[in-house]
Amino acid sequence: MDKKAWEKELEEYDRIVAMQTEFKRKGKTVPYTSANGYMFSLLNKEGKIGFRLSPASGKKFMEDHNTTIFKSHGAVMRDYVLIPKRLYTNDQLMKDTLYEGYQYVMSLPPK
């Protein structure tokens, strides 16, 4: 992915994260959100967005939105789902799903 295309994806990711007040985007080369010692969203080098959800919520999200697991640098990211570009403009869904990821990591034992 060229730099200009990746920067466009970064703008979308930042816009989605900015809908929340409980957390902020971190990272320069690999933008992400984290809480309780766990990452729960990220934008990978390929310009794809992934959200971490509970196993049950992730499975339902993948079925409801015809998507799959999320990979970064060729590795499967545990509990992450790939957010299809077609959903980026569904602000309420993006806001709610990202917040659900935040709640999930907050329910885990702190790292």
Image (cartoon, helix red, strand yellow):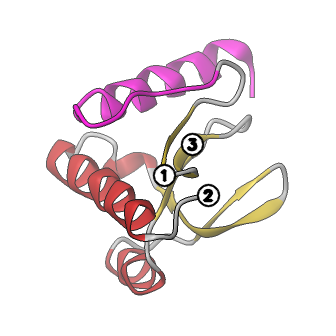
Question: Residue 84, image x and y in percent?
Answer: 45, 54
Q: Amino acid at mark 1?
A: Asn
Give above or below for 35 relative to 3.
Answer: below
In reply to whether residue 13 is colored magenta, the answer given is yes
Q: Which residue is mark 1?
A: 36
State the mark number for residue 18. Answer: none
User: Which of the 4 image quadrants contains residue 68?
Assistant: bottom right
Alpha-carbon neighbours of circle 2 within 10 Å: few (<14), some, or many (≥20)? few
Q: CA distance from mark 2 to mark 3?
A: 18 Å
Residue at 35% of width from left, 34% of height from top? 23
- Please state the extent of the stretch shown in magenta in the rendering: 1-27
User: Which of the 4 image quadrants contains residue 62?
Assistant: bottom left
Q: Amino acid at mark 2?
A: Lys
Q: Are marks 2 and 3 in contact (CB under 8 Å)?
A: no
Q: Are marks 1 and 2 in contact (CB under 8 Å)?
A: yes
Give above or below for 94 relative to 33.
Answer: below
Looking at the rendered image, the quarter that the C terminus falls into is bottom right
Q: CA distance from mark 1 to mark 2?
A: 6 Å
Give above or below for 12 relative to 33.
Answer: above
Describe the element under mark 2 as helix, strand or loop: loop
Describe the element under mark 3 as helix, strand or loop: strand
Alpha-carbon neighbours of circle 1 within 10 Å: few (<14), some, or many (≥20)? some
State the mark number for residue 42. Answer: 3
Q: Which residue is mark 2?
A: 111
Question: Residue 43, image x and y in percent?
Answer: 59, 38
